[in-house]
Image (tube, helix red, strand yellow):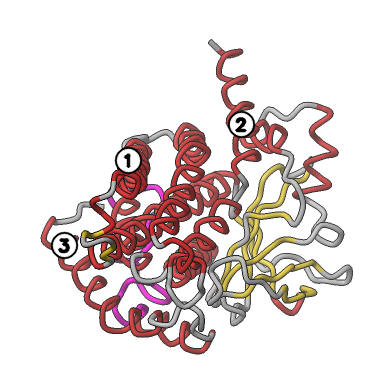
Amino acid sequence: MILEKVDREAMVGAVRDFGSTQIAPLMQRPELPADESAIAQVIGQLVDLGVLTQDGEPELGVWDDLNDQESCKLSTDLISVLAARSSAVAYQVSSQALAANFARVAGLSTTGAVSFDPAVNAAGRATARALLDRPTAADTKVLQDLWGSEETRPRLHLGLRDWTTIWWPRWTSEDRWQLCAIGREDCEIEWQPHGHGLDELAFETVRLRADSADAKGSLGAEHVIAGFTCHSLAVLTISIATARRAVDRARQYSIDRVQGGSAIGEHDAVAELLARGESAIATAQAMLARVHDTVEPIARLHLTWQVRTQAQPALARAGSDALQVFGGIGYMRDVGPEKDLRDLNTLRRIGGSPSELMLRCAAFDESRSRTK
């Protein structure tokens, strides 16, 4: 895809304006998360705006082309602008856009969701070796159990509950990796109440019924790799924007709050907290740019996970530092930094925790060293 600079800037500008007028008012009371119907209405407006391509030919929407670097860069730019106003809205748009891309390729027309999270530990080393198509004999049973037995091992879904089809990776010794579309009517779904971040969305455990029909559609291993990559890119992008929001909020408070005749931002301890946050954000942005410059699919996935293991703990610490600038009041739910931090901590666990991703990256590194 060849994108004119003016087209990219116009689209990002339109989404920024939309966030200011339509999303920001919903987020004014952090202690009272917007309900799902309000978020669904915002998503519908973003479809009309062209940010989310639900039907028709893809153009400038999020994740319209998973294999094109320019398109993916535009996607993360749009996700970042949305996340500046709401981490939950940005995550929902990314998830729905990925599902829409998969549905177009598979010839389906459904309102979809994605899940790249088994409800249990995802066997990091075995998962990575399987993505390289080099699973060991010992890996086979682990992979089959965790990624192939949806009846006994449910998947976690975070998002709105209006989906009709959910896409998730499946691994079997016969077919290896496939990205499968599972109908809602074939699932047992349990809603998990939570208060740990992204409160506007629902946590669900989704289990395939024993008497369920075959998958509505399936795609090959290349789509599994692209899905893992773009899902993690979105999580990283949203984390950066959420940390940015937290640090900006803290910086403004450090200017407004006067103690002993001077703004608290003039104190060295407060300045250090803010500087650490700025450093974490700048480092994560530079790492994200490296991912966008990487072309080969497996190398790109490897780097994406590697960046997440390094950047997301630092971004969560930036959120914690921002909260500390507020002092005790920062822990109150109606102030804002408490929710920013919970969002950041939740994002760390989506698509693989830092420890899980470290194991996957270690397996990639081991495989690379053996082939040199």
Q: Residue at x 46, y 69 (%)?
A: 329
Residue 292 showing in the rendered view: no
Q: Position of residue 220 (x, y in %)?
A: 60, 49
Residue under label 1, please give it: 279
Q: Nearer the viewer, residue 313 or 325?
A: 325
Image quadrant where residue 111 sits: bottom right
- Residue 143 placement, left or right of 110: right
> In the structure shown, which secondary structural element does the residue marked by tag 3 occupy?
helix
Magenta stretch: residue 61 in it? yes
Q: Position of residue 305 (x, y in %)?
A: 52, 39
Residue under label 3, please give it: 9
Q: Main secondary structure of the magenta part?
A: loop
Badge 1 amino acid: Ser
Q: Nearer the viewer, residue 106 or 336?
A: 336
Whole-number angstrom distance, CA of label 2 to CA of label 3: 37 Å
Vertical arrangement, residue 106 with respect to residue 236, above or below: below
Badge 3 amino acid: Glu
* Residue range corresponding to the magenta coloring: 46-70
- Residue 51 placement, left or right of 232: left
> In the structure shown, which secondary structural element does the residue marked by tag 2 occupy?
loop
Q: Position of residue 339 (x, y in %)?
A: 49, 68
- Residue 47 placement, left or right of 32: left
Q: Residue at x 48, y 62 (%)?
A: 98
Q: Position of residue 250 (x, y in %)?
A: 33, 60
Badge 2 amino acid: Leu
User: Looking at this rendering, what residue extends furthest in the top direction?
Assistant: 372
Q: Residues within 10 Å of mark 2 (few under 14, many from 20)?
A: some
Q: Residues within 10 Å of mark 3 (few under 14, many from 20)?
A: few
Residue under label 2, please give it: 132
Vertical arrangement, residue 217 with respect to residue 21, above or below: above
